[in-house]
């Protein structure tokens, strides 16, 4: 393909994609606008419903309070009635969450509602975009409530004038009950209208969004067809580069972090190549760091159990193949729990660090020293038989026993117990480890601060000056 045609195809495709994305963005923006408007409508409807419920609760509480006062004569209910009247006449703030208060009149008799920005329900309804019909209903509710409030005040005056029968007659009269029923119906109609209006708005939003979503799908399909038709030839130009980069990436994914890209790539793909190179180098560094972390004891900086087992497995292969020698020394600090309990864990940690340093210092460069966990260490001595391993273990015991740990303000001396075993050609790491552990167990049972060697099928007690002939 000539360079001119290639550039023209790319330019045409870019402009089409830009125009399509712009249209999709605009349509999506309309969707967000509709969704936001719907959310606002729901919030406003919820607030309108809350205020409506507050009015209903205030009216119900007023009726309940005066009814209880007339039939019980308890003045606390009269006090509640006056509290509600004060809120209605704006001598007291009408709480925003009125229907959450006075739900139990007795328990809330002395409760002072919090102040609120809701003083005039009609004005508040207008601020929440209530429609004209809802405002008209609210005016009707206010007029009926004014009549009921005046009527309830007359009932209260009759009762306070000791005309109890007249007060009860008024309270149970047809006029009062009819007005209460009319008021409840108005409030119910208002609440239903709010919900219906919200439903209509939501249905309208869903209908418009469906049309917009269909338009988005059409645009996306158009762009997909364009890409298939116009960019097919472009793919041929970069396919060889992509295959080369893919093969190269596959090598890197399998651990060949320094593999070289065999083919030259187009200039446009050089940033991809450089990024992969950078990531490969970073991955290589991280792998090395993680390997160090995974195989190093955090406290003593010695290799950990994982590294020790790997080293043992490697040496077992050498022993099995070349019949070479390799011995294992398991070491345990005597009465270490007592040290922690007596001096504290920080001093115990310092002793572990010192013991690790002593073991590293007094072993050969070819020996492998690691901390297995807790107060237990291991020394793996290649090209060393049981006798030489016993002598090494005795030497380490003497060095540690003679070392004074300066842990201000304490000077502490510790001892170790050791168990020794050797790898054999037809054996395995697990058996050798268990043999050394059995020898260590014997060393502890014999009073600690000694070295024991596993030989054959038994564990033998050895002394510092010689080794049993069977070893």
Image (tube, rainbow, N blue to C red):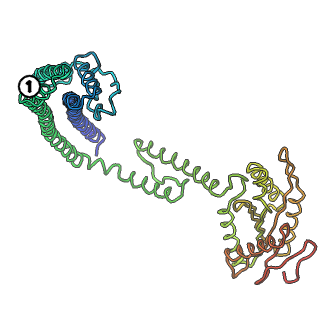
Local secondary structure at mark 1: helix
Front-lying residue, 133 or 230: 133
Residue picked out by circle 1: 133
Coordinates of residue 260 in the picture (x, y in percent): 52, 53
Residue 67 visible (yes or no): yes
At label 1, counting other C-alpha atoms closer than 10 Å, the crowd grade (few under 14, some 14-19, many 20 or more) is few
Most extreme residue toward the right is: 465
Question: Is residue 55 something that shows in the picture?
Answer: no
User: Is residue 392 rendered to the left or right of residue 177?
Assistant: right
State the image coordinates of residue 406 (x, y, percent, origin top left): 85, 48
Q: How many marks?
A: 1
From the viewer's perspective, is residue 352 above or below residue 86?
below
Q: In the image, is 446 to the left or to the right of 292?
A: right
Give the residue at x 59% y 49%: 285
Q: Nearer the viewer, residue 309 or 235?
A: 309
Q: Residue at x 66, y 71 (%)?
A: 313
Quarter of the image for the C terminus: give it. Answer: bottom right
Which of 71/309 is in front? 71
Classify residue 317 by image quadrant.
bottom right
């Amino acid at each position: 393909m000539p360079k001119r045609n290639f550039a023209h195809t790319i330019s045409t495709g870019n402009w089409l994609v830009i125009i399509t994305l712009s249209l999709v963005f605009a349509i999506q923006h309309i969707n967000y606008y509709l969704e936001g408007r719907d959310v606002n409508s729901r919030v406003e409807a919820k607030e309108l419903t809350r205020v409506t419920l507050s009015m209903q609760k205030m009216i119900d509480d007023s009726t309940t309070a005066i009814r209880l006062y007339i039939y019980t004569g308890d003045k606390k209910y009269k006090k509640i009635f006056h509290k509600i009247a004060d809120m209605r006449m704006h001598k007291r703030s009408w709480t925003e969450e009125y229907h959450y208060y006075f739900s139990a009149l007795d328990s809330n008799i002395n409760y002072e509602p919090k102040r609120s920005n809701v003083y005039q329900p009609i004005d508040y309804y207008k601020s929440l975009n209530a429609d004209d019909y809802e405002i008209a209903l609210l005016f009707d509710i206010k007029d009926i409530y004014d009549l009921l409030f005046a009527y309830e005040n007359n009932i209260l005056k009759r009762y306070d004038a000791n005309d109890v029968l007249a007060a009860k007659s008024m309270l149970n009269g047809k006029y009062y009950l009819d007005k209460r029923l009319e008021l409840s119906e108005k409030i119910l109609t208002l609440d239903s209208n709010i919900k219906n209006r919200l439903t209509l708005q939501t249905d309208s939003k869903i209908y418009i969004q469906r049309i917009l979503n269909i338009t988005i799908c059409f645009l996306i399909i158009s762009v997909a067809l364009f890409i298939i038709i116009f960019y097919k030839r472009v793919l041929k130009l970069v396919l060889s580069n992509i295959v080369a980069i893919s093969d190269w990436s596959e090598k890197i994914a399998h651990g060949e972090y320094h593999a070289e890209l065999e083919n030259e790539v187009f200039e446009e793909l050089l940033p991809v190549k450089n990024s992969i190179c950078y990531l490969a180098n970073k991955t290589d560094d991280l792998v090395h760091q993680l390997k160090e972390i995974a195989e190093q004891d955090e406290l003593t900086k010695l290799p950990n159990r994982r590294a020790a087992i790997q080293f043992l497995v490697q040496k077992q292969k050498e022993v099995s193949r070349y019949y070479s020698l390799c011995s294992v020394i398991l070491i345990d600090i005597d009465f270490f729990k007592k040290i922690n309990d007596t001096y504290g864990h920080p001093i115990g940690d310092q002793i572990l660090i010192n013991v690790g340093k002593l073991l590293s210092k007094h072993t050969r460069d070819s020996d492998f020293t690691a901390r297995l966990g807790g107060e237990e260490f291991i020394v793996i001595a290649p090209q060393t038989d049981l006798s030489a391993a016993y002598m090494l273990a005795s030497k380490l015991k003497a060095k540690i026993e003679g070392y004074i740990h300066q842990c201000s303000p304490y000077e502490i001396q510790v001892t170790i117990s050791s168990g020794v075993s050797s790898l054999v050609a037809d054996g395995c790491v697990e058996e050798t480890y268990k043999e050394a552990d059995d020898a260590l167990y014997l060393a502890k049972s014999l009073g600690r601060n000694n070295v024991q060697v596993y030989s054959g099928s038994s564990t033998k007690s050895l002394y510092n000056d010689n080794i049993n002939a069977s070893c």
